[in-house]
Amino acid sequence: DHDMPRLLHVASGDLERLKLALALIFTARGVPRIYYGTEQGYSGGEDPENREIMTSWNQGHEIYRWIRKLCDIRNAHVALRRGVQHEMWCDDLVYAYSRVGDGEEVIAILNNSPDPQRRKIQLREESHIQRGEELTNLLGASDTVIVEPFSGKKAIEVLLKPKEAKVYARC
């Protein structure tokens, strides 16, 4: 909002960190809300620098395209709009949760580390996703994982780049 530093300022100008925060905003519970200019990469700090005048509109801006992709994913998956949220993994670097609703499950995994991270994320006992199923990363369709058995349960193993978000679903 207009009384706070912009999100890109809080992210120290790091576009990958901003994209990670936006992935959380658009996939976690609640209605996503972003302040005007975020999609244009505005980075003002304290008042009045946080109220930049919009002199142009660039639909080709990297953050605009990222937000458009997140909006499209959210609109295509009812679980992201109205689903219940279940935490699956949480440590100092990686956070994973699923959103479940209307027979659909979407899994979001976020790496807040400046280094690559590998995790084996267990699916919830109640998950309708079966062993052997392939899940596709909605943020990068060439990235898929197979649900595997792990300690008598189901799990997916993911390798995340620094500050990367992945959002998996059946496709």
Image (cartoon, grey):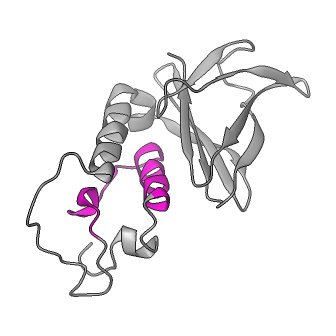
The foreground one among 15 and 100 is 15
Residue with the most extreme bottom position? 47
Residue with the most extreme left position? 55
Membership of 115 in magenta stretch = no
Q: Is residue 166 left or right of residue 56?
A: right
The foreground one among 62 and 124 is 62
The image position of residue 76, as x and y in percent, is 35, 26
Q: Is residue 146 above or below residue 31?
A: above
Q: Quadrant of residue 154?
A: top right
The image position of residue 139, as x and y in percent, is 47, 34
The foreground one among 127 and 14 is 14
Q: Is residue 146 left or right of residue 63?
A: right
Q: Quadrant of residue 37?
A: bottom left
Q: Is residue 159 above or below residue 134?
A: below
User: If the image is split into quadrants, where does the N terminus sit?
Assistant: bottom left
Q: Is residue 104 above or below residue 17?
A: above
Q: In the image, what residue occupies the spot 52% across and 38% down?
A: 84
Membership of 27 in magenta stretch = yes
Q: In the image, what residue occupies the spot 33% across and 82% down?
A: 45
The image position of residue 169, as x and y in percent, is 54, 24
The image position of residue 70, as x and y in percent, is 37, 40
Q: In the image, what residue occupies the spot 65% across and 18% down?
A: 129
**Number of labelled discs?**
0
Q: Is residue 26 above or below residue 80?
A: below
What segment carries the magenta color?
16-42
